[in-house]
Amino acid sequence: MAQSLINPTDTLARQNEKLLKIVDTLMRRAEQGPDTAGVAYAQFERAVMLEEEVRARTRELEHALDLLNSSNAQLATANAEAEAARANLANAIETVQEGFALFDANEHLVMCNSRFGKHMRDVHHQFQPGLPFRDYVHIVSASPYLELPEGETPAQWAAQRMARHKEQHVVFNARMAGDRWLQVSEHRTRDGGTVVLQTDVTDMMLLERQERERLKDDQAALIKATLEHLNQGVGIFDSEQRLIGWNRRMGELLSIQIGRFRIGQSFQTIFEQLSRKVSFASTEDAEALPRWTSRKDRRAALSFEVEIGTDRILAVFAQQMPDGGFVISFTDITAERAAMRAISQVNETLEKRVTERTLELQDALAEAERANASKSRFVAAASHDLLQPLSAAKLYMASLDSDIEDPDQRERLTKASSALQSVEHILGALLDISRLDSGRAAIHPSEIPLGVMLDQMRDELAPLAAEKGLQFDVVPNSAHVSSDATYLRRILQNLISNALRYTDNGRVLVGARRRGDRVIVEIHDTGPGIPPEQQDKIFDEFHRVNAAASAAEGLGLGLAIVDRACRLLQHPLTMRSTPGSGTRFSVDLPLACPTDTAMEPQDDPVAGTPLAHRIVLLVENDTELRNAISMTLENWGADVLACEGHSEAIALLQEIDIAPDVILADYQLDEDATGTGLIADLQAIYGPLPAVVITANREPEVQNEAAALNARLLYKPLDLDALRAALEAQPGFS
């Protein structure tokens, strides 16, 4: 096999160089050597052929160089265009007002503009192309310009940031030094890359903060006005033991200047001031309150007594709130203690052993009654004092309804009225809890047609079911049961309204089953059900399965009232619930034999003509409520004779010598006079005048007094529709 003198893998230039060298060598040998058998000519011929091949290779080399030059020119053009495009892209993202960064599919920084990370001057220079995304997050988390949430470390923030990065869409706000806020958002590109945008939202956050502060100020003003109506000194603290509300009475009872209290002040600071003013009965009492406030778990109510100087004794009561905060109230019980001391002094004349045993028994009994009733007394007193301004506020709201035409203002009025309605429901629940806990709740068993009561509830609650798109069915029945009508209605109303409130779709079914001499009322719903771990807690006060619900939806007192009322009436209450399938509540009632006098559905009195030019004698000792009721009645066309008390009403009627068409009187006028007493006096003078009594007192004695005078009874806060119906339905109105 012939061996080539030229290596094909050499470049054309190298091959030409070798060929020229071979030709030169052959030519030199042909010229120097003898011509034997034509060898010289053959070598010459071969040299010529080689020279021709060199020329061909040279032309190929020149062509290849031309192609290479052309390719280099095109590559240079492409590079120039790429650089121009990159420059244009850099200029474009530089004009973006937000911080902009682009990471490729391998999580490395491709490019960013000068605004990206500008709020972190210490690390801004480290954001260079090629930076891995994880390193970028680590750099940001370690920067002192990033203000982390309280209790969160840079490592925790970085781990949470990387976890969010795995999501398809990411948007969050980050607080920077100097009270600046950035909104950070991530967007995915088609090739798997990531675009990070940083937008300065400081102005928006400031506006939102100002609005929150304004709402807080409004709420603080409302709380302040509410607290000032209480006779007890009250201090309200949040879950961090910081003071958020108090009333002037607190400073008066503790002999501490009101200026010493301020929003955000720690309980420890206030307790130190208190310790210098008061004397505790024992070291245990002195340590009990700070130990109680420092606990983070659920706390039972705490009560004890302290002395200020030698002439004042205060009862201290501490109660936990649902959010972990607490309320401390101070009640002056000096007169009570003085009375007890007087009784003790009178009894000192008795035989020593009897005296000692009597005093021990009295002290034990008083302590037991105080411990059992302190919570209920405080809630009842606070709720009762709030009903007066709440009634006035509702009436003022109603008087504005026809005067406001602006849609936005009407919407605000509607929301305010709804908020007052929620407060009314909450206060009603608190009063019910107080009455049931105090042991003073009186029951009046009677024969009740269960079907009539359930039909009335169906009519009342059907609009709520229709609004939510629920199927609401009440199975007809003719059973008569033995129970207290008021409490039974409250039990069933709470259970049915709860079922409607917590059922988002499906059905609520109410029915009754007869089992021997018992009737089982069942309320079924297709709601979310109650988790097993919460089924033992739903009857506790302030416990709600849906913790995110607003206060307008209640404070979790409905089932607590149901449980207490069922125990009071001895009606067994059972519950069965399956998460995701619904809940069933059952109330076991004793069956009553129907009689000819069994309760039948009573139609509401037919409303009379409007109250135009009817003379209404209004007697109310609360100025704001009196003005509000007067305005409302005048809007209905009535002529109002407004008086503050018993003597003023008698004197006014004697002066004008006109008998009113109807008397509208508050029950508690002052310490010695009542509305029922005034009505009795006026009926003795003018005959059987129609009358309506308004009160926040739900004791049976008030009901009996009103019934004896044939007077309608309305409870505060007043319902306008009920008030108008009661006035127009009085005898003699035509």
Image: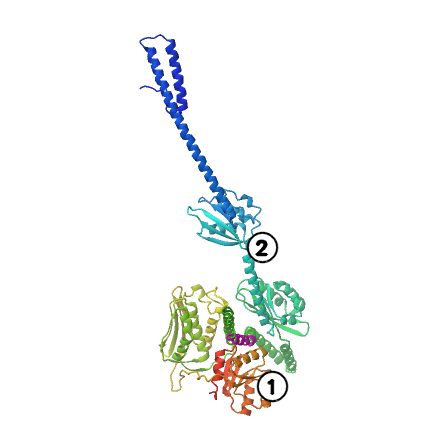
- Comparing 88 with 456, the one in front is 88
**Residue at horizontal 63 percent and vertical 68 percent from the top:** 282
- Magenta segment, principal secondary structure? helix
- Does the magenta run of residues contain 569? no
- Is residue 177 at all visible to an observer of this figure? yes
Instruction: Classify 10 Å Cα crowding around label 2: few (below 14), some (14-19), many (20 and above).
Output: few
What amino acid is found at the position of numbered circle 1 in the picture? Glu
What amino acid is found at the position of numbered circle 2 in the picture? Asp
Tell me: residue 305, above or below residue 665.
above
x and y percent of residue 123 in the render?
56, 45
x and y percent of residue 495 in the render?
43, 72
- Is residue 295 at all visible to an observer of this figure? no
Tell me: residue 86, above or below residue 557.
above
- Does the magenta run of residues contain 388? yes
Res 648 label: 1
Disc 2 designates what residue? 179
Please state the extent of the stretch shown in magenta in the rendering: 384-402
Q: Quadrant of residue 463?
A: bottom left
Q: Quadrant of the N terminus?
A: top left
- Comparing 590 with 488, the one in front is 488
Where disc 2 sits, the SS reads loop
Indicate which disc, 2 or 1, sits on the residue closer to the N terminus.
2
Q: Are marks 2 and 1 in contact (CB under 8 Å)?
A: no
